[in-house]
Image: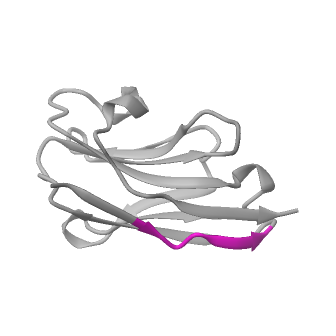
Amino acid sequence: EVLLVESGGGLVQVGGSLKLDCAVSGLTFEDYAVAWFRQAPGKEREMVSCFDSLDSSVDYADAAKGRFTMFDDRDKNPWHLALNSLTPEDTAIYYCAAAEDIRTVFCRVLDADDYGYWGQGTQVTVSS
């Protein structure tokens, strides 16, 4: 069974940084995608960044470009999300997600419903 566990969240001041970690197990690293989502209170869950095995590249949401970086260790595990220049609008629960058998679909066109595996989330709180 695919298991994802996030960690690294916490409380940080405006302009600060955090590095989130996602440990992945059980995933078939062939036709797959890994993504970071976040969900703020009362808001829709949104994708922050994603990686897929089709083009082996990372895509970012507009809100993340220039501030967040998604990267991996050896063998595509664990994955990380470096959060920089944080603002209160970045306060949310951050989730790691994975999808298998994406075939010819790039992760940039996937939605939350397309990811079958989710971690428990890690809280990021940015103080104002």
Q: Is residue 96 magenta?
A: no
Q: Main secondary structure of the magenta part?
A: strand
In depth, the one of 123 and 49 nearer the eye is 123
Q: What's the image's color scheme?
A: one colour
The mark total stands at 0
Residue at image point 72% right, 61% down: 86
Image quadrant in which you'd find residue 82: bottom right
Q: Is residue 70 above or below residue 105?
A: below
Residue located farthest toward the right when viewing the structure as drawn:
128
Whether residue 103 appears in this view of the structure is yes
Residue 94 location (% of width, % of height): 54, 55
The magenta stretch spans which residues?
6-13
Residue 81 location (% of width, % of height): 48, 62
Q: Is residue 8 magenta?
A: yes
Q: Is residue 59 left or right of residue 68?
A: left
Residue 37 location (% of width, % of height): 49, 46
